[in-house]
Image: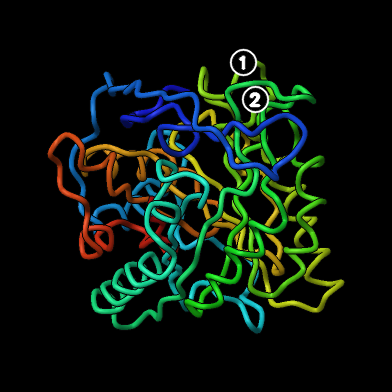
Amino acid sequence: MTPRSGLWRVLAAAAAVWLVLPAGGTGAPPVLALTADTVRPDTLPRPGAQDSSARAGDASRDSAAAGGKAPGPVWPVKGPAPRAGAILPRNRIVAYYGNPLSKRMGILGQVPPDEMLRRLGREVAAWEKADTLTPVVPALHLIAVVAQASAGSDGMYRARMADTLIERVHGWAQQGEGILFLYVQVGKSTLQQELPRLERFLSRPDVHLGLDPEFSMKRGGLPGKRIGTYDAADINYAIELLARIVDEHRLPPKVLVVHRFTRPMLTNAQRIRLDPRVQVVINMDGWGPPHLKRDSYESYVYSEPVQFTGFKLFYGNDTKRGHPLMKPADVLQLFPRPVYIQYQ
């Protein structure tokens, strides 16, 4: 299927740089290596401008349309009712993304921890002011498995962060009275290989999971050279693993964030099996001017409903060509309103 719109996108590990660790482990500091500044401008026509009220009516209009047209997206998604202790949809999550070993992978690693948490607190306050009816849960989104430009000793093109690093960032999240997401870029590895080693952290009530199809090279190629993909079967595996952890440790529901900025990044989305123990967010992960970000949200998140929606904002890449960073009030014009917000 040809998408209706695209988005400028850096083909790099969620920033412009990967971490390349010395062979044999994660104990030594990484060496910043591959830089990818390639911008992929959209060359396809954009859809006509729509406000949120028009989008809200899409499903009912399409369903009633004559001529055999397929029904449009239906929001909110009909799914399991939230269990006790569920974060969504009664709250909104506002997260800072990155890795403390790199200043170029996101805001989480760009400034000292205390200053980073203060800045996150200001963003939380801004969102609470913009939407007074929705409490905000602060979060840190740590890249715990990082796609690599080189194969490494096992040929998997990924580096696993040390448990000590994960513990440190978990401590920062607790200091900020927030939650932690462990974010996974598998390279040529698989979720089946990477997620079990994170179970000791995921068994904690305040630790959740993020997945990045962009760096899942299951169809070949190298990270950063082409955009990867996950299928619904991969997402369902993660859901089943998280659901089991919830049962075994008697936890409140987990949140699973899946990043997306093209259609092929997530195939067979309609086959994702919702579970009351896991709340699934499809997060619009592209960067560029506001109009392209809105169009990509419509094309790749709104158009294929799964459960909940998210939206990513880039302090650097969204504004590097002179465009403004979208404010909470701007993002709240989207339909459906995102309940997960991520800053890089």
Residue 72 in view here: no
Residue 248 in view here: yes
Residue 7 appears at what percent x and percent y? 32, 32
Q: Amino acid under label 1?
A: Gly
The residue furthest right is 248
The residue indicated by pointer 2 is 217
Is residue 226 shown above or below 46?
Answer: above
Residue 313 appears at what percent x and percent y? 33, 51
Q: Quadrant of residue 268?
A: top right
Q: Amino acid under label 2?
A: Met
In this view, the residue in front, 12 or 330, is 12
The residue indicated by pointer 1 is 221
- Tell me the residue at 38%/64% (across/down): 116
Residue 139 appears at what percent x and percent y? 49, 67
Answer yes or no: do the residues labelled 2 and 1 have beta carbons within 8 Å?
A: yes
Residue 260 appears at what percent x and percent y? 49, 40
- Tell me the residue at 69%/75% (across/down): 205
Horizontal side of residue 14 vs 235, given as left or right: left
Secondary structure under the numbered disc 2 in the rendered image: loop
